[in-house]
Image (tube, rainbow, N blue to C red):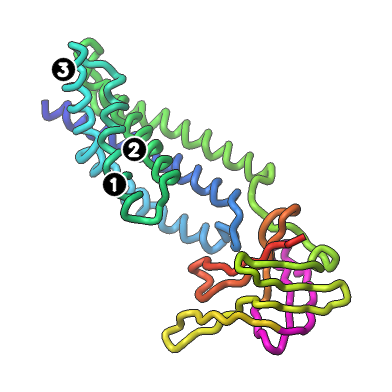
Amino acid sequence: MRDRFGAVLMTSTSVLFVEAVIGAIALFVRDVAAESPSSPYNDLGIFFLIVLAPFLAAAGAVVGYLLSVAVVMPVLVLAGWCGRRYSGREAWWWVPAAAAAATALPFLAAVALTEMGFPAGLGGWLAMTVALTAAALVARRLLLPDRPRLSAGVMFSRVAWYGTLAVVVAGLLAGIGLYAGIGYEPPQLSMERVAGTWADDKDGTLTLTADGSAMADRVETFEHDDSLEPVVHRCTGIGSWEYVQGVAGPRSQTVVVSIPECPMDLWEVLGTPGHPKLYVYVGDPDSWDLYVLRRRD
């Protein structure tokens, strides 16, 4: 019994680890494709990821082990009990039902106590249910009395082989997608495309004319107090502007607005070709708190 328990635990941990790697690849692709003020990766970040990979793998194995003990094993016990109690025999479809029930309460609490929101909470609940169900169903193979007994080593070899294949396929698909250009890039603007009226969501406008004149009407500007918290001012004034294309692609382009009454940072570009945006950081750039203007016309 102890050997079987150890084999189930090892199998579940291995499956969860493979799922975590595939999930990390999927999250990376999502971040690359999402509109973002900065690139989700750079050479230094990739270097640190390679250096930290062994430690991340060890942490992932520990988390997988804890989830196996605290969630997957109870899910298998609950699914087996429900099958015997309500249908007279154990059936695989009780496993996803038990996994969904086990993960529902934590995600309901997260939605209620945080700013996650119901759609994000529902997506997280479904993703966790699928991940736990897959691990539990593979581990359940060791508990079936009518199937040939498999050792922990055999199960680990199978999970390692098929898991490695799945990770390689996921990585190849991600690479093909990135090569095909799914990564986000801001729209490339020009003097003609920058000229016009830009507005925030509080009736503030910045009008940039083709002759280089700029007029701000209740545009927000920011400075920092003694505690480095941003202080917001609504500013109105007249000045000039220029567009700087940059040399490192769309992410390096800026719009320089000079209005004596309204000291502003350089405006950078987000959005899409059809709906461009200008933005500046509010406070620490690492917080990604942005003040955004959108083309009114």
Residue 171 shown in magenta: no
Tell me where residue 17 sits by quadrant.
top left
Q: Are marks 1 and 2 in contact (CB under 8 Å)?
A: yes
46 horizontally vs 53: left or right:
right
Q: Which mark is residue 16?
A: 2
- Look at the image and give the residue range highlighted in magenta: 237-265
Label 2 CA crowd tier, 10 Å (few <14, some 14–19, many 20+)? many
Determine the CA span between mark 1 and mark 2.
Answer: 9 Å
Report which residue position mark 3 lands on. 85
Which secondary structure lies at badge 3? helix
The quarter of the displayed image where residue 212 is located: bottom right
Does residue 233 appear left or right of residue 136 in this picture? Answer: right
Residue 27 horizontal/vertical position (percent): 49, 46
Q: Amino acid at mark 3?
A: Arg
Q: Which residue is denoted by mark 1 in the rendering?
A: 63
Q: Identify the residue at image location x=68%, y=62%.
A: 294
* Left or right relative to 293: residue 207: right
| Residue 18 visible in this rendered orientation of the protein | no
